[in-house]
Amino acid sequence: MDKFLGFSYCESSSGYLIFMGPDTLLLMNPFKRRQKEVSTLDLDIKSDYKAYRALLAFVKGSDEFVIVFYSKSSVNVYQSQNYLWATYLESNISSDFDFVDIAVFHNAIYVLTSDAKIGVLNLGWCSVSINFLQLRNTPRVNCVSLRLVRDDDKLRVVNFTPKRILDVYEIDFSKMEYVKLNTLGDLALFYSPRTSCHALSNPSMWGYYSNHVYSICTSRPKCEVYSWSNNLVDFYEHDHIHGLQVPYRSRLYWRDWCFRNLHEEVEHSLIYIPEWWTLCLP
């Protein structure tokens, strides 16, 4: 446990728990007992660690990995192939928005902004850029509670409001437009207000209910479970999840869901490294 001294929990991704320290990102996989450390000395990081989130993805067909470490105003990308950080700032384009979520879909990294714009993250050798999609019917919002949610073949945007009323949209890539949904269907959503949201198809296999949302309660060691049907929300709480009581001492860390079987992968073609540079790598 000494490894955690001075570190703050950031997020879970690809089965790893990600912690942030003064000059290091600590990645730990408690299921496979693996650990990675990445220096952040080259980044201009503010002192408020809670303002940052992270995504870990592995390069398809290799052990190399990519870390996307971002706040509302910047997206920082680390590639293990070249041991370098690259940064994309919100000020790079003339728009007033916040970065609110990032997800891997079909081996590409998608970025979501507070005004519901969606972009694809392009990873260069020592640079990063974002190609924003031209989507029709983009909802007119300015909300930090927007989340990207994906399953095997669909990408969705969910708007969580303080009243727990959900607006759920599916991205139709064939027509390049937002499509508003009236139901979650066979999905269950697992939401953490401070971090991310995950979708689980056929949740009855695991003892959960379809068309339901399971939300971490940040103030108490409870899971808020509510159904969504015909735009009506029924809200109730559980002190125990499937009979498992949450230890009292863990209440401050009860803020995220960890899916150990999720293994995010990106295509190698998204990452360009000059051939001469590979000769210099240690």
Image (spheres, rainbow, N blue to C red):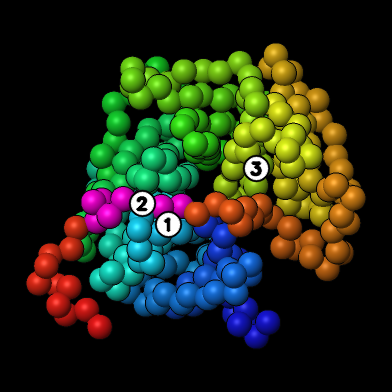
Q: Is residue 131 above or below residue 36?
A: above
In the drawing, what numbered circle is on residue 266?
2
Judge from the rendering whether residue 32 lies leftward or rightward of residue 95; answer left or right. Answer: right
Q: Which of these two is toward me, 243 or 177?
A: 243
Judge from the rendering whether residue 148 lies leftward or rightward of residue 8; answer left or right. Answer: left
Q: Which residue is mark 1?
A: 57
* Residue 72 position within the rendered picture, expressed as x and y whole percent measured from the top left: 44, 50
Judge from the rendering whether residue 272 lies leftward or rightward of residue 184; answer left or right. Answer: left
Alpha carbon separation for disc pair 3 and 2: 24 Å
Q: Which residues are magenta?
A: 264-271
* Residue 42 position within the rendered picture, expressed as x and y whole percent measured from the top left: 32, 74
Q: Three-letter amino acid code at disc 2?
A: Val
The answer to whether marks 1 and 2 mark residues whose Cβ atoms lie closer than 8 Å is yes
Q: Three-letter amino acid code at disc 3?
A: Tyr
Count of numbered circles on the image: 3
Q: Residue sitting at 72 percent across and 47 percent down?
A: 216
